[in-house]
Image: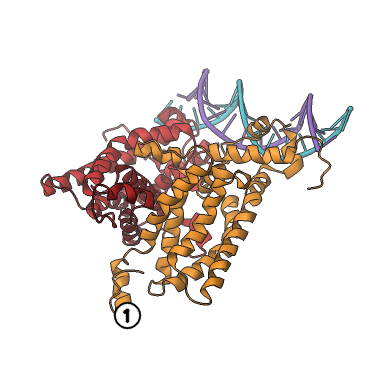
Chain colours: A orange, B red, C purple, D cyan
Amino acid sequence: MSETRTQPDTRERILDAAERLFMESGYEGTSMRMITGEAGVNLAAVNYHFGSKEALLREVFRRRLNWLNAERLRALDALEAEAQGGALKPSAILEAFFGTLLKMGRDQSLGGMTFLRLLGRTLTEPADFIRAFFAGEYAEVIERYKKALFRALPEVPPEEIIWRFHLMLGAMSYAIAGTDALQVITGCEVDMNNDGPDAAQLLEARVMPFLLGGLRAPLPQFQLLQVQQSKPEPTKAA
Amino acid sequence: MSETRTQPDTRERILDAAERLFMESGYEGTSMRMITGEAGVNLAAVNYHFGSKEALLREVFRRRLNWLNAERLRALDALEAEAQGGALKPSAILEAFFGTLLKMGRDQSLGGMTFLRLLGRTLTEPADFIRAFFAGEYAEVIERYKKALFRALPEVPPEEIIWRFHLMLGAMSYAIAGTDALQVITGCEVDMNNDGPDAAQLLEARVMPFLLGGLRAPLPQFQLLQVQQSKPEPTKAA
DNA sequence: GTCTATATTCAGATAGAC
DNA sequence: GTCTATCTGAATATAGAC
């Protein structure tokens, strides 16, 4: 905040450039020369300010994930306070979890669609240190939401809920990240490449019903058998 | 088939090693020295047999996708012949499309889970030539299945079907590819790392109900308004 | 803090002997 | 077809002047 800044924020310019280029070309596919070139700073500045390319990537994410994690916890706290100890509605939980994410897409100062797409892509990056980093960053929030879903869907086996959480994350990530990848595959133009509020709003209207439908789908056969022994009439999961 | 082979198939050994390493470390993260090392062949052999690293990647996929594409078309042909000109059930279409994919996971000679995970991961690789390659390979099959879904769900706007197709692909890809990525995130062990029939069967039982639930979810608000003007009682999509 | 110049490593690719 | 040896370029990172 109160730094003696000489240039218009070299550090910030590097983070912005890296965010965009990692999104576009992936971590391994982006060189530090590309980053410093786009940022208009000297090559050595990255190592001076961040120490290494790995540390730069971590900082790119930390800058945004701090807000996302805090906001997701806050949204869940608010829901639970309102419910006064009762179980939450599955749709409200998804709204808190994914709605918060999509709010980032609508706000440039939080990263906008650029960061959302970077996030979706990076979850599948194979580099070990990236996976380890995300595991640490996400652990607390995921744990809280998992527990909320367990309480919201008591008749669904926890293992099944975890799988469906997994599948919802995947669908959302692809919807965000895979724009060109999968829109080429589906052979249709999709209107998400531009930043701004429209893309995130459309995404929300389209994806949330799909996720909720998947989350509340009938249980697979082999689990229905287990459940029927303890409860009558469990055809629907919720 | 009738080659004058000196060694136990250098070409095939390279393809197998590349398939596994690309799956594990990604395209950019895998060097030709890693590949030839694992295959136990000379470094120069890759360029001799395939010409370049790019061409090697394409051949890794072509070897498997030829079967997948043909089988997916065959499965759809069979369904349409059986329906005698009528519309198909959405569940049958998904079964043909994703069931065929998962059949590969159960059969080592078709690539097994290794290839399935490679496929899921590679769809999000950002390199341009990879996206272009997939677009070409998938075009025909996607077109046929899209049309089948349009007919199967006449009350759902085509644009919405395309989105949900997109979302189903994403969920399935993550379920397959993101094993360690997302199982770390969800904080639970998932039993998919090993090859073999069990993993693919479990996957099928778990994922298919989710996909069908998403595909048939209620339409988003803004599309309900459009549809209600032409048809009564369209609360459910199917 | 910023720059130039460079150290070091490793990538993909190829020439040419066998 | 397979090998050794090597070319060429590009990557990350750093030393040291300013």
Q: Which residue matches tag 1?
A: A231
Determine whether the residue tagged by mark 1 lies in a helix, strand or loop: loop
What is the x, y in percent for residue A159? 42, 68
Residue B71: in sight, yes or no? no
What is the x, y in percent for residue A144? 55, 67
Classify 10 Å Cα crowding around label 1: few (below 14), some (14-19), many (20 and above): few
Q: Chain of mark 1?
A: A
- Residue at the (26%, 43%) spot, across then down: B145
Q: Please tell me how many numbered marks the rendered image carries.
A: 1
- Residue at the (31%, 62%) spot, across then down: B205
Looking at the image, is B67 positioned above or below residue A95? above
Comparing B5 with B229, the one in front is B229
What is the x, y in percent for residue A122? 54, 47
- Residue at the (31%, 49%) spot, across then down: B101
**Amino acid marked by disc 1:** Lys
Is residue B222 found left or right of A52 in the rendered image?
Answer: left
Looking at the image, is B160 positioned above or below residue B179? above
Comparing A98 with B121, the one in front is A98
What is the x, y in percent for residue A26? 55, 40
- Residue at the (55%, 66%) spot, across then down: A76
